[in-house]
Amino acid sequence: MADDTDLRIATADRVATLWLDRPGLPAIDRALCKIFARPDLDVLVIRTAMPAGFGVIQSQSEAAAFAGAGQRLFQKLREASLVTLAFVEGPCLGPAFELALACDYRLAVEGPSSRVGFGDAPTCWGGRTHWRQLSGRPAPTATNPRSLDIFDSVCCERRAKIDLQTWLDRLLANPKKRRAPWRSWFVNRAEGFAEERRQFVRNRPKKPLNPWPAFDTILPIPAFPPIVGLVGGDLRSTALAWEIATRGHRVIRLTDDAALPRPNRLTPLELQQAEGRISVATNASSLAQCGLVIVDDSGLSPAFLEHGLPARTILAVAPADAARFAELARRPRRIVGLEFAGDSLAIVYPQQETSPDTMAALGAWLQQLGCQPVVTHERTMAEVGTAMTVT
């Protein structure tokens, strides 16, 4: 049965499912009140795949009110008579991870974009306090769910529905709330909540310095390229190869090192399928069908790489080489500097002639790979013919 609240709710067979596809305390509160008013429900499943971020908090008083409202809402969730189950798919960072910690049970689906943790923003809804109650390990910023013992089960995407139904059958047969862990006796929750509120007021999220702009493009943003070329063999290139291949796209690696370390997060079937999409080449002519080529091997000749590439291929190179590539390229509008920082930040360096269409497409593709693209301030947006819009 679909519901008309701000957030999607469905109920069937004593189970309510709430989809959190966007943050927002009032919407979550209204949805929970509606669910808790139903005496015929025993289990609440909260499905979340939200990235980190609270938005922009304008003042200290607004930050304090926001933190207090979230803590009260999550306390209501913990004290509910229903058994609560967080079902995490995709990235679950910051506020979404705090919500998962407030549930009785936690399941996670391990996939290409799986990242769970507190993110880089300060917590304010009691997340770190509950983390101390649940685990004696350091608080994670962003990690694979399989590395955290606070998840009751972690499965691959292929078994997600089966695993969820197995747990629902188990909980419906014995719908009892989970007992508080022994560590909770040594954690002063009231003091922890108060300290999180104070920290959040002091370090509340400000307006981002480098929001990804909206580009005034001529052409629509194309779909992610079916074939991507990776030049070089460093660790980041290896990680990108698996990330792209597990999403169903082909990868051509131009490298002298054919060895490709296997990631631990994939099932044997997923590993076999991804491995079949990755091939190794020894000359640039093999990249003739690539819509995107990412280079981490400094010192290569621009002409060597650009020769034979399709006219609309984007060539993303190391920032130190970007100016040299753009100056000598036949299609400088398609050249851009690119480097990765950490697990998810992609820093984009537009060149003098980089086109808005190139920037818009590359930004969209990076986001599809689970990266947050950021444009450097080394050049103004006017120099690449863009109109900045904060979204």
Image (tube, rainbow, N blue to C red):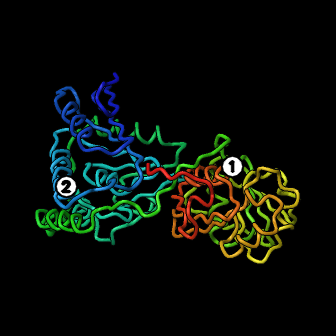
The amino acid sitting under disc 1 is Gln
Q: Which tag, 1 or 2, sits closer to the chain's start?
A: 2
**Contact between labelled residues 2 and 1, with CB atoms less than 8 Å apart:** no
Q: Residue furthest front?
A: 382
Return the x and y of residue 163 as percentages of the image width and height.
44, 42
Element class at badge 2? helix
User: Which quadrant would residue 206 be assigned to in this image?
Assistant: bottom left
Q: Residues within 10 Å of mark 2 (few under 14, many from 20)?
A: few
Return the x and y of residue 180 as percentages of the image width and height.
18, 56
Return the x and y of residue 19 as percentages of the image width and height.
36, 37
User: Which quadrant would residue 259 be assigned to in this image?
Assistant: bottom right
The residue at the point 31 percent across, 27 percent down is 11
Q: Which mark is residue 46?
A: none
The amino acid sitting under disc 2 is Glu
The residue at the point 32 percent across, 61 percent down is 205
Residue matched to label 1: 273
Residue matched to label 2: 62
User: Which quadrant would residue 12 be assigned to in this image?
Assistant: top left
Mark 1 and mark 2: Cα distance apart in space: 49 Å
Camera-side mark, 1 or 2: 2
**Going by the image, does 134 lie left or right of 294?**
left
Look at the image and tell me in which quarter the N terminus lies: top left
Q: Residue furthest top?
A: 1
Which is nearer the eye, 126 or 154?
126
The residue at the point 23 percent across, 68 percent down is 202
Looking at the image, residue 322 lies above or below residue 216: below
